[in-house]
Amino acid sequence: MLLMIPGPVQLHERIIRAMARQMIGHRTADFSEILAFCVDVLKEVFGTSGDICLISGSGTAGMEAAIASFSNVKKIATIENGKFGERLGEIASRYTEVERLQFPWGESVDLDAVKRAFDNGCEAIAFVHNETSTGILNPAKEIARIAKEYDALVIMDAITSAGGDYVKMDEWGVDVAIVGSQKCLGAPPGLAAVAVTDRAWDCYNENCPYYLDLAAYRKKLKDMQTPYTPAVPLFFALAEALKIIKEEGLENRIQRHRILSAAVRKWAVEAGLELFPNLNEYSSYSNTVTAIKMPEGISDGELRGALRKEYGILISGGQGDLKGKIFRIGTMGNVGKFETVSTLAALEDILSRKKLINPALEYAQILLRDLP
Ligand SMILES: *Cc1c(COP(=O)(O)O)cnc(C)c1O
């Protein structure tokens, strides 16, 4: 099966092999060396000189750790224009008062509404950078800039942007950011990294959940350890995944993600399909996952079923109310031209058989030509 879903992603052979080895003690120099390397590369990925807390748990564990640990604020605003933004709102509601800025899924964020939330007394904001459920890239820099005018804390879910698109925490003024292992980093699922700048500790909540208390992670970082037994095999895999990122170079990696997603979009548009997100002057299409409206004349089950059965390729459908209305193609991690062209060719076969699209593969291939 070829995984072209927005996580978990297809694993590079080297990353699979990295996990097949004997356990090591987590209170040893061997483990500290692995952790130190991960911390170092993740700082570059997040664009920060802050602390990198690595939690054994999925991306959502990182989201909850970030919000719960820094929820000592009167009120937090959450931006919700997709499933993961809504999740931020649900998590935050458990820890403090929340002003949930809700937009229809796929719509762009209204920055005036963000400003009003701070005028209404919000002291922090949490938002999703790359909203995986709708394929939109929210304007992180602009949101952080407004928050800083009010001296508010900025928490950003960078789960499907970090490692695949530009994330510049320190430059943009993002205080806390989260990434999951199984998306653009290209590792298996099960680890979350939370990047924390010093500023965040002004909002520290000492009554946060014990396992997700980032103060414990920060304290143990001084000895280059984790507070509790980490998922050691996943650290082997993450270190190898980050080594691949270093070898490719972060900038090259970001450009590869951009070209791959641009090729998917170009194919869709030339084929006569419609992209799902509704952009404004601040938002843009995601550079890591593409959401396309399901054409009339085929169901989600038929399209994704044929792709899976005839070609062994897995893509995603819509989540929640978008089920059956869109399909999503992830171009994250270590996939390249081969996987992307194969996916588009297979989709083109299935859709043009039913006369639902015009052949458009060559347009995508032209964009992919220069990709190594
Ligand atoms: C995948 C994802 C998450 C949640 O990650 P899990 O690993 O499933 O807990 C959160 N936010 C975004 C934007 C995601 O794409």
Image: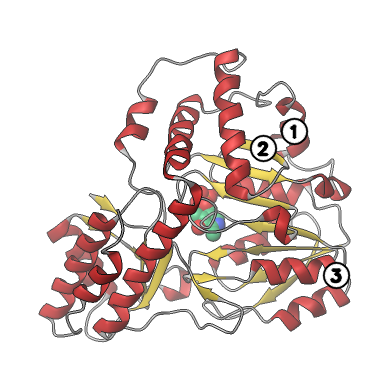
Mark 1–mark 2 distance (CA, rounded to whole Å): 6 Å
Q: Position of residue 96 (x, y in %)?
A: 81, 58
Task: Identify the residue at horizontal 54%, vertical 25% (top origin).
Answer: 34
Query: Within 10 Å of the Cα at label 2, are there few (<14), some (14-19), or many (20+) other Cα atoms?
Result: many
For discs 3 and 1, the disc positioned in front in the rendered view: 3
Mark 1: secondary structure? helix
Q: Which sits in the foreground, 71 or 6?
A: 6
Q: CA separation, marks 3 and 1?
A: 28 Å
In this rendering, position of residue 268 left or right of residue 308: right
48 versus 349 height, above or below: above
Does the CB distance between marks 3 and 1 fall below 8 Å? Answer: no
Label 1 CA crowd tier, 10 Å (few <14, some 14–19, many 20+): some
Q: Which residue is at a point 59% across and 63% down the rendered structure image? A: 129
Residue topped by disc 3: 149
Is 64 situated above or below 128? above
**SS at mark 2?**
strand
Q: Using the image, tell me which numbered label, if any, was put on residue 53.
A: 2
Corner quadrant of residue 26: top right
The amino acid marked with disc number 1 is: Arg
Q: Which residue is mark 1?
A: 218
Which residue is at a point 71% across and 70% down the rendered structure image? 143
Q: State yes or no: Cβ of the residue under disc 2 lies below 8 Å from any atom of ligand 1.
A: no
Q: Amino acid at mark 3?
A: Glu
Image position of 131 with respect to 28: above or below: below
Q: Position of residue 94 (x, y in %)?
A: 74, 55
Which class describes the residues within 10 Å of circle 3: few (<14), some (14-19), or many (20+)?
A: few
- Pinpoint residue 210: horizontal percent, then vertical percent: 73, 35
Marks 1,2: beta carbons within 8 A: yes
